[in-house]
Image: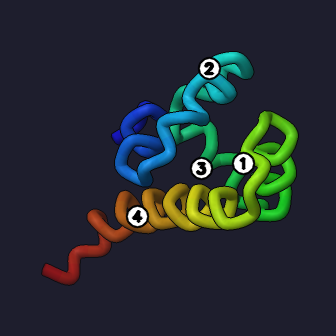
């Protein structure tokens, strides 16, 4: 899942899609890169229009989790 619309739909927050598209932040990988500094991601989410704290936190957690899922696939612990 690399398109932010899929993530937003999965989280039940499709109302924010236009905010992300307006800022050309449509790839989860971009959010993941920014999410290496979660406070920066929270600030950006607020600036683009994700006004509710709970929604920002859910998005940050989902973005961070998407990165660990990808990292976890290569650990060889099968």
- Judging by the rendered image, the residue that carries numbered circle 3 is 32
Q: CA distance from mark 3 to mark 1?
A: 5 Å
Task: Provide residue 48's location: percent of width, then percent of height.
Answer: 79, 34
Residue 17 in the image: above or below residue 65: above
Dot placed on the residue nearer the N-terminal end, 2 or 3: 2
Residue 9, horizontal then vertical, whole percent: 39, 41
Comes first in the chain, label 4 or label 1? 1
Report which quarter residue 3 is drawn in: top left
Position of residue 38 in the picture relative to residue 4 (left or right): right
Mark 1 and mark 2: Cα distance apart in space: 16 Å
Q: Is residue 2 left or right of residue 62?
A: left
Say the numbered circle drawn on residue 34: 1
- Look at 59% across and 50% down and name the residue there: 32
**Which residue is at 64% across, 28% downward?**
20
The answer to whether residue 61 is left or right of residue 24 is left
Q: Residues within 10 Å of mark 1 (few under 14, many from 20)?
A: some
Quadrant placement of the C terminus? bottom left
Element under label 1?
A: helix
Mark 2, residue position: 21
Within the image, what quadrant is residue 5 found in?
top left
Q: Kindly indicate whether the residue at mark 1 contacts the one at mark 4 (C-beta within 8 angstroms).
A: no
């Amino acid at each position: 899942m690399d398109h932010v619309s899929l993530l937003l739909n999965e989280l039940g927050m499709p109302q924010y899609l236009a905010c992300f598209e307006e800022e050309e932040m449509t790839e989860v990988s971009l959010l993941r890169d920014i999410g290496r500094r979660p406070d920066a991601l929270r600030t950006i989410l607020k600036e683009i229009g994700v006004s509710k704290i709970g929604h920002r936190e859910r998005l940050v957690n989902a973005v961070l989790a998407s990165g660990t899922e990808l990292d976890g696939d290569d650990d060889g612990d099968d």
